[in-house]
Image (cartoon, grey):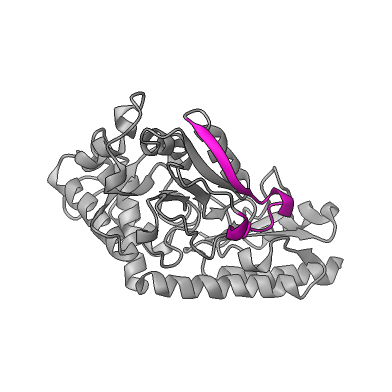
Amino acid sequence: MTRVFNFSAGPAALPEAVLHQAANEMLDWQGSGMSVMEMSHRGKDYLSIHAQAQADLRELLNIPSRYKLLFMQGGAVGQNAIVPMNLLRGRSAADYVNTGEWSKRSIAEARKYGTVNVAASGEALKFAGIPKQAAWQLDPNAAYVHICANETLGGVEYHWTPVTGDVPLVADMSSNILSQPVDVSRYGLIYAGAQKNIGPAGLTIVIVREDLIGHALPVTPSAFDYKELADNDSMLNTPPTYAIYIAGLVFQWLKALGGLPAIEARNRAKAALLYDYLDQTAFYANPVDRADRSLMNVPFRLQSEALNELFLQGAQERHMLQLKGHRSVGGMRASIYNAMPLEGVQALVAYMKEFEARHG
C-alpha cells in the first residue's frame, strides 16, 4: 500500500501514528473486547476516553479554568448560528470582520438572529489581506466581535490578536487551531470543526468563557445551548464518541512531539519552504499579502490556467492529491496542516520545479 501526500483542505490528513493506533484498537480497545464505536457513552471505558481528551486539550492550549470546553456536532457552519443564539445575551447586534468566504457565511447566518455590523472588510484588498485594526469600526455596545482566524479558501490568516476591549472576541479557528500556541484568555469564545487539525469530521470544539453562557435565545435547541452542554459535560445527547477518541489520540501525538511550540516550528518550516519557492518564480503566484499568509492553506496559480489539469495529473502520478483550488476561487491550494510531513512539502516543491522546467 502506498500512502499519498494528502493536501486536502478537509477532511484532512491524520498523523500516521494515530491511524495505526486506531487500527490496532479497532476491534478491542485496551482489553474491553469492543470497539470504541460500540461503547456506551455512559460507560466507564468511554468516559475515561472523554475525560482524557478534555484534559489533554486543556493542557495543550493552556485553557484557563474559567472556560468551558465543549464537544459538539454540526461543524463551524452550525456554530455560525449557535454563536449568536448563545452570545447575543439580550443585545441586538454583533460586529463581524469579513476576510473571505467563511466570514461571509458567518455573517449571513448571524443575520437571521440579530443585526450584523460589518466592522471591516477585506473586499477592497480582494480578500488578499486582513484590514488593519485601526480602520475597524467597532461598536462598543456589540454583543461580541467575530473573526475567522484563518480563511481556508483564500489562505489569509491572523498573525495577531485583535483588541476589542470589554466586547468578547469570538474566533472561528477551524483551520488553524492547534497549529501554534494561542492565548485563550484573550478570547470570549473559540470554535473549530475538527476535520483539519484535530480528527474526523463530525466533532466541533467550543471553548467559551463561563460568564458568557446561560443567556441563550428562547428558540435555542437544548442540544445547542452552551449552558446545558456545559452542565452535562457535553453529553446532553450522545456525543460523536469515535471522533472524540481519534481527537484524543491526536492530542496525545501533539504532546509527544513537544506540544504546540514544537508543531509551530514544524509548520513554519513547511510554509517557509513553499512560500520561498513561490516568491522566487514567475511561473507560479501566491496572491496573499506576505504579512497575512496562512501557515495552513497556501493558494497559488500557474502562469497559465490551461496548464492546471496537466499539473494536477502529474501531481497525482507522484502520489500528491487534493491540490485543486476551491471551485469558487480556482487555481491550486496546498493545505499543509499539522499532519502533513515536511517530506510532503519537499516533494511538492520538487514537482513544481520540475513542472516549471518543462512548461515554463
Q: Residue at x 47, y 63 (%)?
A: 339
Q: Residue at x 54, y 44 (%)?
A: 96
Give the residue furthest to the front: 140
- The magenta stretch is 114-135
- Judge whether residue 126 is colored magenta: yes
Q: Is residue 73 left or right of residue 3?
A: left
Q: Which x, y percent locates residue 271?
A: 59, 70
- Judge whether residue 164 is colored magenta: no
Q: Is residue 60 left or right of residue 84?
A: left
Q: Is residue 135 visible?
A: yes
Q: Residue at x 41, y 67 (%)?
A: 181
Q: Nearer the viewer, residue 101 or 345?
A: 101
Q: Which x, y percent locates residue 201?
A: 44, 44
Residue 17, by quadrant, is bottom left
Q: Which x, y percent locates residue 282?
A: 82, 69
Q: Nearer the viewer, residue 55 or 2?
A: 55
**Quarter of the C terminus within the rendering:** bottom right
21 vs 193: above or below: below
Q: Is residue 39 visible?
A: no
257 vs 187: above or below: below
Q: Which x, y percent locates residue 250?
A: 36, 60
Q: Nearer the viewer, residue 245 or 236?
A: 236
How many discs appear? 0
Q: Residue at x 69, y 60 (%)?
A: 315
Give the residue furthest to the left: 44
Give the residue furthest to the top: 219
